[in-house]
Image (cartoon, rainbow, N blue to C red):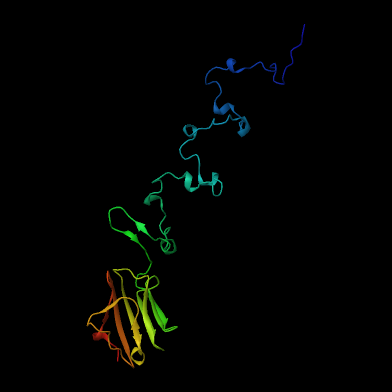
Amino acid sequence: MALTKLQSNGLAVGAITVSSIEANAITLAKIATNAVDTGQLVNDAVTSAKILNGAVTGDKLDTDAVTTSKILNDAVTTSKILNGAVTSDKLNTISNVNITGGNITNANIYDVGLRVSQISSSSNAITLNYETATVFVCNATENANITLTNFPESGVALLKLTYGGNYTIGYAGNAKFATSTAPTLTAAGLDHLYFEGNVNGYLVTSVLDIQGA
């Protein structure tokens, strides 16, 4: 009579087959911790339907595991953006934006607010860069042309210019003047010059009622 090899638990090797196990006989309580590892899982055995809601948490994701190609369209809503997550440095890079509804079309968005910038005349130019400020303070030290950069059609800016009357101050670009001629600047004081963008260039107004002495 042939002898049957028994395991330590008294069962013959291969005695328990899949067909010998009743449906639902193996429960989670009967599976040892770490008994099922990735090597025992058939390819594609773990589907999204078998993953519990909330089972995959941030600490279970590898660094850089979530890429843009894995984010569904419209998956990131405003409620999922943390307070303070969108900062000014992330807005400064936005250009040529088209928003449906016609509110903003092909526009450059700058974090300007009411920033004040101290500037100087350099290489015979006084440059008002709308990307950096809307109020500019300058002491004229030479003949110079006032140049506007990054200035939108609807933009407004204020230049507080001291000693402008001591030099020849011109206006680069397509400038128009509120009194048809360029303002007469003060030699030993402060002038406030207001710039307003429009489709034809920009309008320059001398704000005489607050002109410095």
**Which residue of the protein is positioned furthest toward the top in this rendering?**
1
**171 or 6, which lies in front?**
171
Residue 110, percent across and down?
38, 66
**Quarter of the rendering containing residue 160:** bottom left
Quadrant assignment for the C terminus: bottom left
Question: How many numbered marks are there?
Answer: 0
Task: Give the residue drawn at x 56%, y 46%.
Answer: 62
Q: Is residue 205 left or right of residue 61?
A: left
**73 or 49, which lies in front?**
73
Task: Give the residue drawn at x 41%, y 48%.
Answer: 76
Residue 2 to residue 62: above or below: above
**Quarter of the rendering containing residue 107:** bottom left
Residue 12, percent across and down?
70, 16
Residue 46, percent across and down?
53, 32
Task: Give the residue drawn at x 39%, y 85%.
Answer: 144
**Which residue of the protein is positioned furthest toward the left in this rendering?**
179
Residue 122, percent across and down?
44, 83
Quadrant assignment for the N terminus: top right
**106 or 58, which lies in front?**
106
